[in-house]
Image (tube, coloured by chain):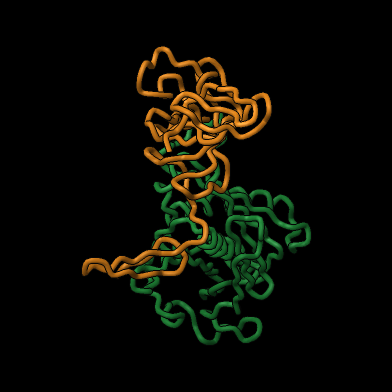
Amino acid sequence: EVFSSVTGISQQNERGGLTRVDVIEERKAIVPSVGSVVTCRVLRINSRFATVEILVVDGIPLRSVFRGIIRVQNVRESEVDQVEIPKSFRPGDVLVAEVISFGDRQYHYLSTAKDEHGVIHALCSQSGEAMVPISWEQMQCPKTRINEWRKVAKS
Amino acid sequence: MGLREFDYGPLVSVEGGSEETIRERKRQWNELRPLFMRTRMVSQAAGSSYIEAENSKVICSVSGPLALTGGRTEAIERAKISCYISRTKFCGLEDAELEKRATTEYEGILCRALESIVRVEQYPKSTIEVHVLVIEDDGSTLPAAITCACLALADAKIELRELMACCSVAYANGQLLLDPTLGEAEKAKSPRFCPLQQARRGYLSLRCPILC
């Protein structure tokens, strides 16, 4: 007999002769774990890392905010020694990253090395408009036409 | 003091009491007080529940999983469960000292009981907070708190191995009394708490240290 470890409504699906049993939950209890893809907002930056607050884990909103950092060596895969944090992230940016370790007491360690990870939403520092990605390392403001440096997520 | 294990069916086959035991409202020695339980009582909490056994009323709210606050070295591959028990000023217990002593001990018992049922390895590097408020105390509030906390955790959709119910037993005048009220517990040598886990086949086992 199979027992569920959470309360919810059970749903059974037949697929290829096998029955799959799921529990439909309204809002799952989840925490960031190694390998999960997280959506975060940048809080502050310095020359060594960017501090972010993790908002969504694997598509499920977190019940309380967890904090993480993205260190220079984890921003991208190529030319790692030439990475500059202020040219990759700015406070207020929303980005997608992967959790690579539980890190230290306060922060989870995240990485945006993959092409599909990086900034997905940023505001122009001059006009405040949402910028549009133009390459993997630049975003452009539609109003002022200014290009700003970011580590952009490939969509 | 020895440990005896009882096989406990649906409230009828615990040995150690007699039918002549007179309790308030003609309650049998192995009869629990009428229970009322309900979840989703606190809208702001991740999960909550309320339990009422005649005059014992306990409400429990669960928050989490929350991020660990820095400054503590805890095992990070599992969640930490923090329990806080508080009582209202009008709960009926008068001796403030007794209240204070028992609360810390009760919080420890509650934590250990919940750690055995929560799948803590599913929530690494986080903490689950369980807040219990005893609104009115007429005996057996720790067992009520344990049952209530389990329901609140289930309401919060936190993964559990099993559901847990708990009941206390008092030993007075050579008789066992299940679910003693405050008055009955005071007359007893000392009440013992017996977590009852609902095992896979709906079979409840009762472990209770008895003064022999």
Identity of the residue drawn at 58% across and 51% down: B63
Residue B89: % across, % down: 78, 57
Q: Quadrant where the N terminus of chain A lies?
A: bottom left
Identity of the residue drawn at 47% across and 48% down: A59
Residue B131: % across, % down: 62, 53
Q: B68 above or below B117?
A: above
Identity of the residue drawn at 41% across and 63% down: B162
| Front position in the image: B126 or A35 | A35
Residue B70, located in which quarter of the rendered image? top right
Q: B31 above or below B204?
A: below
Q: B9 above or below A143?
A: below
Is residue B191 among what the camera can see? no
Chain in orange in the render: A
Q: Quadrant where the C terminus of chain A lies?
A: top left
Chain in green in the render: B
Q: Is residue B86 left or right of residue A10?
A: right
